[in-house]
Amino acid sequence: MAAYRLQKRCDEEAVFVVEGPKMAAEALASGFDIRVVCATTEWLSAHPDSTVATETYEVSPAELERLSNFKTPNQVWMLLSRPDHSSLITHHSSLTLALDRIQDPGNLGTMLRTADWFGIRHVVCSRDTVDCYNPKVVQSSMGAVFRTQVDYVDLPQWLADCGMPVYGASLQGEPLSTLHSPLSTPKVLLIGNESRGISAEAMAHVTDPVLIPNIGGTAESLNASVAAGILMHWLSS
């Protein structure tokens, strides 16, 4: 099982790892295929529903530590099958989140969590965006990865074909406060790379560049996930 600490092994077998009671509860409620559960005696006793897993093992805290990606393992470790999105129906909502070259796992996980908060069920990513099943993404999503369809696509082509207005975060955009309501729906919000912003290829398909005004006038920039949260709130309203 320790081999699944390697992302390459997880990618090859189309699986991902979930750790800790909070995420394990999300996994059990998700309907995802749970292949393996490794947990302490106490956790297994409190969760008879864990028998839905193909394999269940009672392990000691020391054995759990050898499996864990974290410094302080917490009661339960699970291995789940990744969903086959080719067989899923795309979720439609008033806003779709598109992500261009997001690299930081914590940022992606936070964006998924925020999208979940605003009821955004479809996230489209460029193929060079960090894997949504990276352990740090899964953990920081706080369960949103189970409720959000995340697709990896040729993003400029997807934007060209989506048939929706595309709002893109840009320093040359229109300030949020001047946008006219009600906004078009459905629509896309495009967020770019943490340091380089939206690529030229994706920006070519932005119909409505938008700017979060720097009211304080001192900070150089916003964290990508913070900017995404502000824009999701604004465009979901």
Image (spheres, rainbow, N blue to C red):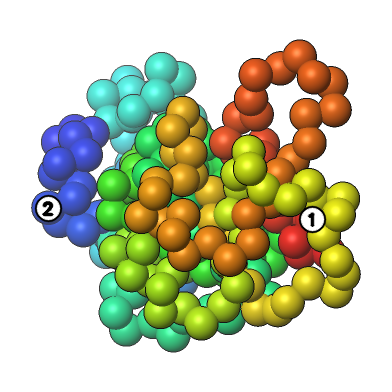
Q: Between marks 2 and 1, how big is the CA–CA gap?
A: 39 Å
Residue 123 visible in this rendered orientation of the protein = yes
Give SS at disc 2: helix
- Near-viewer residue (51 or 131): 131
- Near-viewer residue (62 or 148): 148
Give SS at disc 1: helix
Location of residue 150 in the rendering, given as x and y in whole percent from the top left corner: 43, 63
Q: Please name the residue shown 15% across and 56% down the image.
A: 13
Q: Is residue 106 left or right of residue 135?
A: right
- Which numbered circle lies on residue 234? 1
- Which numbered circle lies on residue 114? none
Q: Please state which amino acid type lies under the numbered disc 1.
A: Trp
* Quadrant assignment, res 6: top left
Q: Please name the residue shown 48% across and 39% down the image.
A: 197
* Quadrant assignment, res 63: top left
Q: Please state which amino acid type lies under the numbered disc 2.
A: Glu
- For disc 2, the neighbor class at 10 Å (few under 14, some 14 to 19, many from 20) is few
Q: Is residue 139 left or right of residue 227?
A: left
Location of residue 191 in the rendering, given as x and y in whole percent from the top left corner: 54, 49
Q: Is residue 122 left or right of residue 126?
A: right
Residue 134 to residue 217: above or below: below
Residue 142 visible in this rendered orientation of the protein = no
- Which corner quadrant holds the C terminus? bottom right
Q: Where is mark 2, residue-wise?
A: 12
- Near-viewer residue (146 or 129): 129
- For disc 1, the neighbor class at 10 Å (few under 14, some 14 to 19, many from 20) is few
Task: Say which of marks 2 and 1 sits in front.
Answer: 1
Q: Please name the residue shown 70% across and 79% down the image.
A: 185
Q: Please name the residue shown 58% across and 66% down the image.
A: 207
Q: Is residue 139 left or right of residue 183?
A: left
Q: Give the residue furthest to the top.
A: 218
- Which corner quadrant holds the N terminus? top left
